[in-house]
Image (cartoon, grey):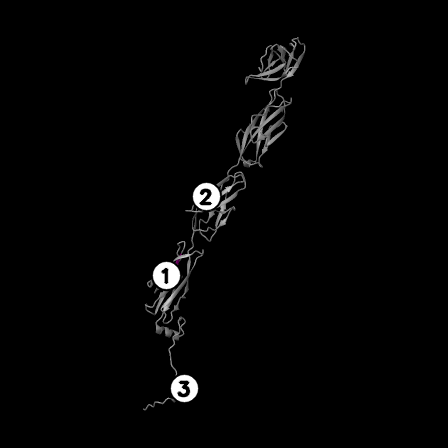
Amino acid sequence: MTEAKAAVKSGRLRDGRILVMGGRRSGTNLDTVEVYRPEDNSWEKIGELTSVRRLPAAAILPDGHVIAAGGRNRNNKELKTAEIGYFNHAPIVKLSSPANDSVTNANNNRIELRWTASDIEGDRITNYRLKIGTSPGASDVANTSGSWRTSYTFDFSERPPNQTYYWTVMARDELGDWSDWAPTRSFTVRNRTPEAVFQFSPSKTDRLRDVSFVNMSSDPDGDSLTYKWEYRLQGSSGWKQFSTTKEPRVKFPEVGIYDLRLTVTDPYGASHSNTKTGLEIYNLAPEIEPLFPPSGYVTEMGQTKVELKWRANDPEKDGMNQYRLKIGTTPGGDDVLSISGNWITTYTFDFSHRNPNQTYYWSVMGRDVHGDWSSWSPVQSFVVPKQLEARVEHARGGRNFVGKPVVQSMSFSPVSRLLSSPRRVIKR
C-alpha cells in the first residue's frame, strides 16, 4: 500500500485490480482509496471517500460501482451512511501501423497512421488526440484532436526527406476519462539516391565534330535533377567540367582518349556519378599545297636554280614541325633528291651540275605538331631545256617558255654611209 494502515476494506474490481478503502493509521481513521495492480505489483492512490470510514461494509455492484456503508468516523463513532463510487477505467490505445522504426520513400508523399482503442468496461470511445514531432513526445509537426477516429493521413510532400517522425495517440471514453499516450512509434521518410545513366556518340571523331550525349538519368522519388558533365584526358590528373545542360553537344579540344563523367544531384543533396571511357579524339592530318613553280614551268636560259615553294593547310590550325621533299626524273620518283628536316616552306634546287633538257618532278609532305603526316602533295614539274631548243621554242611562240626571250645582237650602219662607200666590182 502507499502507506501503512489497518482495519481496511478491500475487494476485487472487474479488471482484476484490488480496491482498498478506509482503515486506521496511528490511531486516526482514514478516508483514502487506493488500488493494487497485480500485473506490475504496484499501488496507486486514486481518491478519497466522502467520509472517514474504518472497517466499512463494501461491495462491488454488477454495473461496476462500489458501495461503502457504515464503519466508524473520525471520532470513532459508528456511521449509518453509505456512498457509491465508480472506478472507471480509461481506454487503452494501441498503435497499429506503420510498424515502429519503419521507413517510407519520399515519393510516396503521404503515410497512413492507424491505431485502435479498447475499454475494459466496454465504454464508447468518443474522442482522440494525435501528435507528431521530430523528437519523441514532441508535437512540432502536428497536434490535432477531434471526434473518435482510427486513422490519420500525414502528408509530408512539402517537408524535407531524410527525416524521422515520432507519433502517438490518446483516447477518451464516454465518461470523460482520457487514456495515457500510447507508446510512441517512429517512421522515417527516406530520400532515395538518383541514378546517372548516359550514352555518347560517336565514340571516335576529330576535334572539329560534335560529340552528342543522351541522358537517361532518373530519380526514384521523382525529384528534379541537376547535371554536371566532366571529362578527363587519360594520363592527366584532374577532371574538367564542360557542361551543366541535360544533353550537351560539344567539341573536345585535345587529341587523345577521354574519360567522361556525369553527376546527377537531387534538391536534397543526394547524388550519383557514372563514368564511361573510350572516347577517342583524333587529329586531322594537314594538306600540302604547292605554290611555285607551277607545273610545266620552263626555266630561263642561263638559270641554274629554281626556288620551290609550298604551304600547309591544317584544318585544325595546328603548327607544323617536319617536312619531306622528293625530286625525281619520273612522277613520284626521288632519284634526284630526297630530304627531310624541320619545317620549311621554301627550298632552292640547284641544277647547274645536271644535264639540261630534263623534266623534274617534285612533291612535299608535312607533319603537324601532333605527329600526323600529310599525304604527298600533288606532283609538280619544271623543265630545264637545252639552249638551242629553248630558242627554237621561243621562235615558234612556244607557250611553255617562261624565261627571257633569246635575242641575237646585230649592228647596223646608216644608209648614207653604205651609199658613199666605194663599190667593189666583181668581174666575170
User: Which contiguous range is marked in magenta?
Assistant: 363-367
The amino acid pointed to by label 3 is Val
The amino acid pointed to by label 2 is Thr
Distance Cα–Cα, label 3 vs label 1: 60 Å
Front residue of 320/373: it is 320
Residue at the spot of label 2? 275
* In this view, 221 is above or below 322: above
**Residue 47 occupies which quadrant of the picture?**
top right
Q: Earlier in the sequence, mark 3 or mark 2?
A: 2
Q: Earlier in the sequence, mark 2 or mark 1?
A: 2
Crowding near pointer 2: few (<14 within 10 Å), some, many (20+)? some
* In this view, 246 is above or below 310: above
The amino acid pointed to by label 1 is Leu
Q: Earlier in the sequence, mark 3 or mark 1?
A: 1
Residue at the spot of label 3? 415
**Residue 343 occupies which quadrant of the picture?**
bottom left
Front residue of 270/346: it is 346
Q: Does the segment drawn in magenta span residue 320? A: no
| Residue 325: image tag | 1
Mark 2 element type = strand
Quadrant that contains the N terminus: top right
Question: Which mark is nearer the camera, 3 or 2?
Answer: 3
| Residue 129: image tag | none
Question: Which mark is nearer the camera, 3 or 1?
Answer: 3
Distance Cα–Cα, label 2 vs label 1: 46 Å
Q: Does the segment drawn in magenta span residue 364? A: yes
User: How many discs appear?
Assistant: 3
- Residue 30 point in image, percent of width and height: 63, 12
